[in-house]
Image (cartoon, helix red, strand yellow):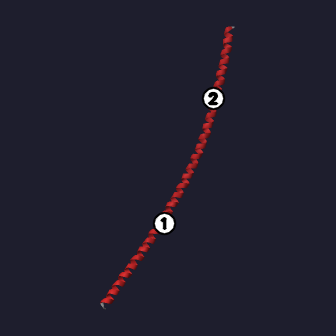
Amino acid sequence: MSIKEAGIEFVSKIHNELIKIRADQLELGQDLTERINGVANAVKRLDAKFEKKFDAVEQRFDGVEKRLDGLEGSHQSMLATQQSMLDTQTEMMRILLGIQRKLDVN
């Protein structure tokens, strides 16, 4: 084998090895891309589950808030009723005191 043939064979082997390395790199790149996509899909699924749970909790809080608003309205109504009853009792006491004074004078 001449030096020229040996050189060509050597360059061909290097070229083939570079092609093989490049193919391996492409394959590894493809594997990495698929793994990244798999992780991204898993994150999306987890995010969707989180969103569903967050929405459920938010709905429960909205329900509790509505109930508290109702209780607050009922409490305000009771306070108004109690104040009205106190006003009525105070007026009745004034009337009774007035009657008692008139009876004491006579």
Looking at the image, which residue is at 51% across and 58% down?
46
Q: What is the residue that sits farthest to the top in this orientation?
A: 106
Q: What is the residue that sits farthest to the front in this orientation?
A: 4
Where's the C terminus, which quadrant? top right
Say what secondary structure mark 2 lies in: helix
Q: Nearer the viewer, residue 66 or 9?
A: 9
Specify few, some or many for label 1: CA neighbours under 10 Å numbering under 14, 14-19, or 20 or more. Answer: few
Q: What is the residue that sits farthest to the bottom in this orientation?
A: 1
Residue occupied by mark 2:
82
Choose top left, top right, bottom left or bottom right for residue 91: top right
| Residue 52 at x, y percent in the picture | 56, 55
Say what secondary structure mark 1 lies in: helix
* Whole-number angstrom distance, CA of label 2 to CA of label 1: 66 Å
> What label sits on residue 37 in the rendered view?
1
104, above or below 2, in the image: above
| Residue 21 at x, y percent in the picture | 39, 77
> What label sits on residue 96 in the rendered view?
none
Where's the N terminus, which quadrant? bottom left
Specify few, some or many for label 2: CA neighbours under 10 Å numbering under 14, 14-19, or 20 or more. Answer: few
User: Is 49 left or right of 8, judged from the image as shown?
Assistant: right
| Residue 92 at x, y percent in the picture | 67, 20
Instruction: Identify the mark nearer the N-term, 2 or 1.
Output: 1
Q: Which of 64 and 30 is in front in this view?
A: 30
> Given this view, does label 2 or label 1 mark the residue nearer the observer?
1
User: Is 80 left or right of 49, judged from the image as shown?
Assistant: right
User: Is 51 left or right of 94, judged from the image as shown?
Assistant: left
Q: What residue type is labelled 1?
A: Asn
Looking at the image, which residue is at 46% across and 67% down?
35
| Residue 104 at x, y percent in the picture | 66, 9
96, above or below 22, in the image: above
